[in-house]
Each structure stands twice: as C-alpha cells, then as structure tokens.
Image (cartoon, rainbow, N blue to C red):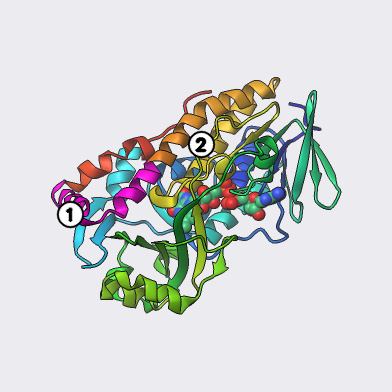
Amino acid sequence: MPQDRPVLIAGAGIGGLSLAIALARRGLACQVLERRQDPSEAGAGIQLGPNAVSILTRLGVAERLEPTVGKPEALRVHDGSSGRLLAELPLGRWIAERHHAPYWVAHRVDLHKALREVAASLPGVKILTGCEVASFEQRDDRVSVQVADGRQFEGSVLTGADGIWSTVRRQLWPAADLPYSGKTAARAVIPSSEAPAPFRASAVGVWLSPGGHVVHYPVRGGEEIALVAILKEPWPGEGWGLPVDRDALLGRLRIFSNELTSFLARARDWRRWPLYDPEPLAQWSRGRVTLLGDAAHPVLPFLAQGGVLAIEDAEVLATALARWSADPEQALAQYEQQRRPRAGQIQAASRRNGWIYHLSGLPAFARNLTLRTAPGERIMALYDWVYGWKPSVV
Ligand SMILES: Cc1cc2nc3c(=O)[nH]c(=O)nc-3n(C[C@H](O)[C@H](O)[C@H](O)COP(=O)(O)OP(=O)(O)OC[C@H]3O[C@@H](n4cnc5c(N)ncnc54)[C@H](O)[C@@H]3O)c2cc1C
C-alpha cells in the first residue's frame, strides 16, 4: 500500500480511532477525517466486555484507560417494579479467567480520550478535525474524498467509520433504511457520593419492566455512576445527546420501584438517544470503500456490544489491509467475510435481549423464575460466543 496514499477514515469515534491505532501498529499510514472541531464524547457510560478489552490491551490503549474504569464483580438483575433481586451473574475474576481479559465499564469521555491520545502519539496517524466527509469518488487505484469545505483527500482505501447516520453508507447504499425501534435511551452520570449504598456497589445493575429497563454501573474508578433508562416511546425526533425534559422523564420512570426512582431522581442532566433497528446490510464494501462500526451495523444496545463490535472490526480490517497490502479490494472482501456474520449475530442477539427484558405477564413470570433458579455461571456461559470472540487469521 503506497505510503503517499494513506488509508482514509471518515470519523474519529470509537471505531475510527481504533482502526487508526491498529493500522499504525502494523506500519500502515492513515488520515482520520472528523466532522467535529472538538471530537469529544457525550457524558455517558460504556460497557467493555473482555472481547474489547483484549484488543484494547494489544493496541496499547488499555493501560492508559485502566486507572479510570470500573471493574464490576457481578451483573445484578432485578425485577423493575418490585425491586426484587432475580439473579447475580458473575463478572470480575470469573469472566477474566474464562476469557483471559477483564470486563470493564468506562466513562465514554475517558475511553475516547485514551484512544485519541494513543492515536495521536503514533507515527503514521494524522487526525484532521472540522473535516466533514461529503462524498467520495473511486478511480482505478485510489479513492478521493471531498470534504464539505471544498478540500480533497486521496487515499488507497476509504473506511466509513462515521456512525449511525453515515454519509459514506448513504453514498454506497442510498436505499438502506434506518427505522426507529420504538425505544429511546435516556442517559446521565451522577457523582457516587449522591447515590444510596446499594447503587455504589461494584456491579452492573439491570432493572427489568415491560415498559423499559434501567442499567447503572460505576465509572471513573467508582467516583461516578453512569445511568441508562430505556423506555418504549414514540419517536422523539432526530438527534443524539439532546437534553430531555427531566420532570416528564421522571414521571415516566414511575413504572420502576421507589428505591430505583428516588435514585434516578438525583440525576439532573438527562440526554436522549432514540434507538434504531435496521435490517443488516447485504454488503458493506464496494471497490476500495468499506464501512465499520455503527456505519456498517447499528445494533440495539441491549447486549452492550455496539462499540465493542467497532473495536473488533478495526482489528480485523487492519489485519486484512496489512496482509493484502498489494490488493486492498481483496483485503476488504476478507474483512467483510469475517465480520458480517458476527455483526449479524450480535444484532439479532441484542434484539432478542430487548424482547426478553421487556416481557410482561406470564412470559415475564417464567423469565424471572428461570433467572432466580438457574446458576449465574450457567447463564453467563450462554454468552461465551460474545465475550470469548478472538480474531481468526485473515
Ligand atoms: C444508549 C446507548 C448505550 C450504549 N451502550 C454501549 C455499551 O455499553 N457498550 C458498547 O460497546 N456499545 C454501546 N453502545 C453503542 C456504541 O455507542 C456505538 O456502537 C459506538 O459508539 C459506535 O462507534 P462508531 O465509531 O462506529 O460511531 P460513533 O461513535 O458514532 O463515531 C462516529 C464519528 O464519525 C463522525 N462523523 C459523522 N459523520 C461524519 C462525516 N460525514 N465526516 C466526518 N466525520 C463524521 C462523528 O462526529 C463521530 O465522531 C450504546 C449506544 C447507545 C445509544
């Protein structure tokens, strides 16, 4: 791959930055074109399963991130309306030993900062901000990218890592639909000092109800708690990370137990993310252009794997581009062949989890009975295929 024609990456999010680092570690040059002037992240949490942490370790990001993360011992599942504990599933040492990497929970700002700092420190990585990819053109052995302000960039390959509303995907597959799932996430972060003791535990808490569910976990080394409330509601309008009417939200959260709602009421600054649930794309790449992360496969966050998938994609794509450096189209074909089935499986499992979380009546009773009686290790073992994923040699 000629060094004067770098790999172009649209988007400096989790996926784009992970790809930049993975390429640089393999000696390949890249330019990351990011729309925002200040590409910082929203105040929200992210769970990173062992399948992500093992890659972040190889990329040299984990050691920078580790001082800020939460290391939950368990995943505690509650009945949302009564507050009753239904199951305690092992994380901590159990999952770290099983999959040779730990389960972490992080503040998104910390993850993004660690990725950005590592990327910026590596030779061969150039990050350009205020650089909105508008369109691209493919010619023989190169791709040229036009940016909204008129600038043009040339590369050997273009990767659209530009998120759920990807411009690159829209040019590749203009007919691809992005339907609203009927559910919106509200997120907030609060200081742990404001939380009652049970919510400060080193655990991921999940509260299930037919109308939605709530997830919380400690971040910033236990100093703060990240909250997510997912509720069924009509489409609230476009845009991610917009402020939410707090009183209206708290009113709707009354479907949950008093213990949980009085905890949630302590958060002031709630923001919303309408969730989308498209069918998988039949193809990600065309010629020298491909997609990665949410641009390729937006997933519902009910398995906490969307960002993790973007990190996995980055590792596989960088390996393929290094291995097939003389034939980028072959590299993209190999990448897609390995990643599309995996993304499709995670997409389907995330959807299924949402369905299980929001059961009502007898099916909810049966779910709760199973959770109360089955050993936690056995339930977690059902997710070995998720957390134990390893890149196979391309
Ligand atoms: C409520 C909620 C909870 C979640 N929880 C988890 C979790 O616990 N664990 C997990 O793994 N995942 C989780 N996810 C999913 C995760 O956030 C996404 O999958 C992840 O952010 C995708 O990363 P990405 O790099 O593909 O896209 P993004 O993070 O969206 O980054 C895209 C980047 O591209 C830039 N961009 C956009 N358009 C252009 C353009 N035209 N030109 C240049 N730049 C552009 C954007 O500014 C942005 O910086 C959650 C999602 C939601 C909504």
Question: Residue 52, image x and y in percent?
Answer: 46, 43
Label for residue 280? 2
Measure the C-alpha gap from mark 2 to mark 1.
32 Å
- For the point 16% across and 46% down, the residue is 374
Amino acid, disc 1: Phe
Task: Let me know if residue 375 is in the magenta part.
Answer: no
389 relative to 357 in the view: left or right = right
Q: Mark 2 Cα within 10 Å, few/some/many (few <14, many 20+)? A: many
- The span picked out in magenta is 349-374
Q: Please identify the residue farthest to the right as the structure is shown.
A: 150
Question: Residue 271, image x and y in percent?
Answer: 52, 68
Q: Earlier in the sequence, mark 2 or mark 1?
A: 2
Task: Let me know if residue 364 is in the magenta part.
Answer: yes
What is the secondary structure assignment of the residue under circle 1? helix
What is the secondary structure assignment of the residue under circle 2? loop
Question: Residue 283, image x and y in percent?
Answer: 58, 29
Q: Quadrant of the N terminus?
A: top right
Q: Which residue is mark 1?
A: 365
Q: Quadrant of residue 267?
A: bottom left
Amino acid, disc 2: Pro
Answer whether residue 169 is visible to the viewer in this image: yes
Label for residue 166? none
